[in-house]
Image (cartoon, helix red, strand yellow):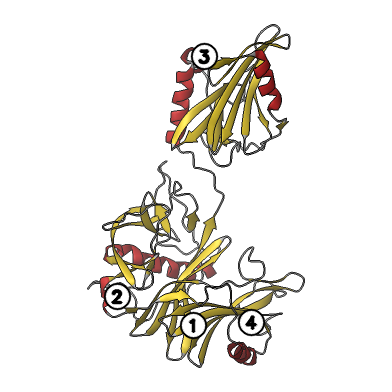
Amino acid sequence: MIFACSILPLMAGSGPDKKGGANLPPMFLLGNNNGMMQMVYWTYVEEPQMDEEYPEYYEEAHRVWELQEQFRHNASKYTKLIVDGMKTRDVKYVDEILLNPDGEEIFPDELHARPEIPSSGARFALVGEPKLDRENIPGVVAVTDSYLANHKALSIKPASTEGEEPLPSSVIKKMEEKYGMKVNHSVKSTIIGDRYTYGVLQFEGEYKNSTRKKHDPNEKSALALEIIIDGDKVYSYPVEGWYDPEFGPTWNADDGGEYFPSDIAAAFEGPQGVELCYLHWAPESATTGIMLLNNGNLDRQEYTVYHSLIDEPMPVWKKDIEEMKRLYVAEDPGENENVELTKWAHVFIDYEGEQIWISDNEEENGAFFSREDGKLKLVGTVRPNLKPSFPESRDSKHYLVISGPAGGPSYYTEIFKFQGGKLVESFNALEVYGEIEGCALNGKEVSPEQGKAYMKAVPDAIEPFIFWTDINGQ
């Protein structure tokens, strides 16, 4: 399978450097995997082959693969992490991850919000103290020692500490004259090396001089500019988006019609000019690359566009399934060991935590689990006579009820309360002819009056959305 991604040719002078990496371009470490930083791969490691059905994608896909291969085969040469613009931390290459915990090949080109979900890529560790934790990533750009020998790191600071500021009016006027369009928004973003100013601007209306290849002849373009200011000199790089006469412009999904400035993650002055390592975040993507200011021209060389995933549920691996099965059987071996559990589903009772329902085909037998502090905990079991229901959340309290007939005039109820992602209370009651015969809160007996009040305070049940996953993948 070929995955295409737009990318310009490699930086002039870049390429595999067997003598030490002077010509190797900066690397972006965007992943965080088990306390290590990661260069996340954007395509599979196998060389792409010509697809007769889509031959137009081959050249582009191969160029993407070649850039990734350059980083892969020289990973051990990347020994310096750029911190706070000009400082460095030592890093070392550790290993490469291509398979998930189930032994399956990981789909590339994805950044995960959850560190528990692995991305394919090369892993790096900080050398010395302090160690990396999930909330403390000091930088995202790594370089080789040879690269630093002929590139001077430049300072980076926000252009304003008091909110968003527009670009100077003289710059806006100059760009309006150059492109023959009216600017409707601009941002002065970053000061680099106490000399250069980086910002962006966008024009209103349709960009009629588009050079972008269009699959639909009715497709219209919008135009934004990357801007570098050096004294009285202004350099621009055009970035085309899409323009809809009714809804306006867009460059990235859900960008609200605004072209965002990039984060300048590191900046250098080298033999070819000023190099700016940029990271362009959007609601659902992250683009990495380098802007190069050289010989009076501003160029932008894109590495890749990652799919940035958010609101992902915790992964459930095969080892998790086996652990839930083990705990289920251990809860009542004589009753449960002959039950075949065939499917599981996340049940979003408390969004701060993780609750899983594992079940047989008919949803007559199974159990609910909560993952707390990384461990799976059995909450309650489902029987043919005991069914789950899901009360509405109230005041940051979330509920699971398992109840049903217990023989003759008896009715049994279990209520589980979650808060802050953890199970905080459990209640059970046995009713006979509608009257409570016995009840307990957190294992301690309480009066029927207290039990009745507890049950009455639980909100009414709502219909949940349950998406089942087959354990055997069928």
Amino acid type for the residue under numbered disc 1: Thr
* Residue 80 seen by the camera: no
| Label 4 Cα crowd, 10 Å radius (few <14 / some 14-19 / many 20+) | some
* Residue that mark 4 sits on: 210
Q: Seen from this angle, which residue lies furthest right? A: 246
Q: How far apart are marks 3 and 2 (CA)?
A: 66 Å
First in residue order: circle 3 vs circle 4: 4
Q: How far apart are marks 3 and 4 (CA)?
A: 70 Å
* Residue that mark 2 sits on: 147
Residue 27: image location, x then y, percent:
37, 67
Q: How far apart are marks 4 and 1 (CA)?
A: 27 Å
In the picture, the disc for residue 335 is 3
Left or right, 382 with respect to 408, comes to: left
Residue 86: image location, x then y, percent:
35, 73
Amino acid type for the residue under numbered disc 3: Glu
* Residue that mark 1 sits on: 197
Q: Residue 26 occupies which quadrant of the picture?
A: bottom left
Q: Mark 4: which secondary structure?
A: loop
Amino acid type for the residue under numbered disc 4: Ser
